[in-house]
């Protein structure tokens, strides 16, 4: 079995381009609700705010597999990321979706965010 890491062409970095690694830790039993929200709404709203999704993952091993979503976004720059996140959080559709998805309780307990730039030897640029 072999695996190969490749990135879609739309995730090529420009000079100030940054990637953002985000790790969401959910409240117990709430990962399925988070995955549904991302699948049905969040990704599309990201696109509307120039936040390009590179990929989404869930861990294979316990205990993280039960409450963790990991994903990478790309942004034109750090300044653009700040602006895009602000506009995303204020988007009326997002506000509505977020509220509706949490009708049975809060979903996300903690978010870790790390901005990254590719090394000169990285296949993903």
Image (spheres, rainbow, N blue to C red):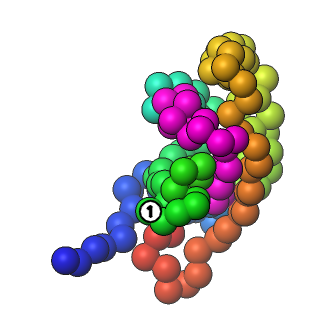
Question: Which is more toward the observer, 110 or 42?
Answer: 110
Q: Is residue 117 visible?
A: yes
Residue drawn at x 52%, y 56% is 65
Label 1, residues with CA under 10 Å away: few <14, some 14-19, many ≥20: few
Q: Is residue 80 visible?
A: no
Residue drawn at x 54%, y 51% is 66
Residue drawn at x 58%, y 59% is 64
Question: Which is more toward the observer, 57 or 7?
Answer: 57
- Vertically, is 102 above or below 122? above
Residue 98 horizontal/vertical position (percent): 68, 22
- Vertically, is 29 above or below 97? below
**Where does label 1 land, which residue?**
60
Q: Could you say which quadrant of the image residue 89 lies in?
A: top right
Looking at the rendered image, the quarter that the N terminus falls into is bottom left
Residue drawn at x 78%, y 23% is 90
Magenta stretch bounds:
20-37
Residue 105 horizontal/vertical position (percent): 72, 24
Residue 50 included in the magenta stretch of the image:
no
Residue 24 included in the magenta stretch of the image:
yes
Q: Residue furthest left?
A: 1
- Vertically, is 91 above or below 66? above
């Amino acid at each position: 079995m072999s695996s190969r890491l490749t990135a879609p062409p739309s995730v090529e970095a420009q000079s100030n381009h940054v990637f953002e690694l985000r790790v969401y830790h959910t409240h117990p039993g709430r990962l399925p609700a988070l995955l549904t929200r991302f699948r049905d709404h969040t990704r599309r709203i990201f696109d509307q705010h120039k936040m390009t999704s590179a990929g989404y993952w869930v861990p294979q091993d316990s205990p993280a597999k039960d409450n963790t979503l990991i994903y990478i976004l790309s942004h034109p720059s750090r300044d653009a990321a700040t602006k895009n996140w602000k506009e995303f959080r204020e988007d009326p559709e997002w506000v509505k979706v977020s509220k509706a998805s949490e009708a049975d309780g809060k979903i996300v307990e903690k978010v870790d965010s790390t901005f990254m730039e590719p090394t000169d030897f990285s296949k993903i640029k």
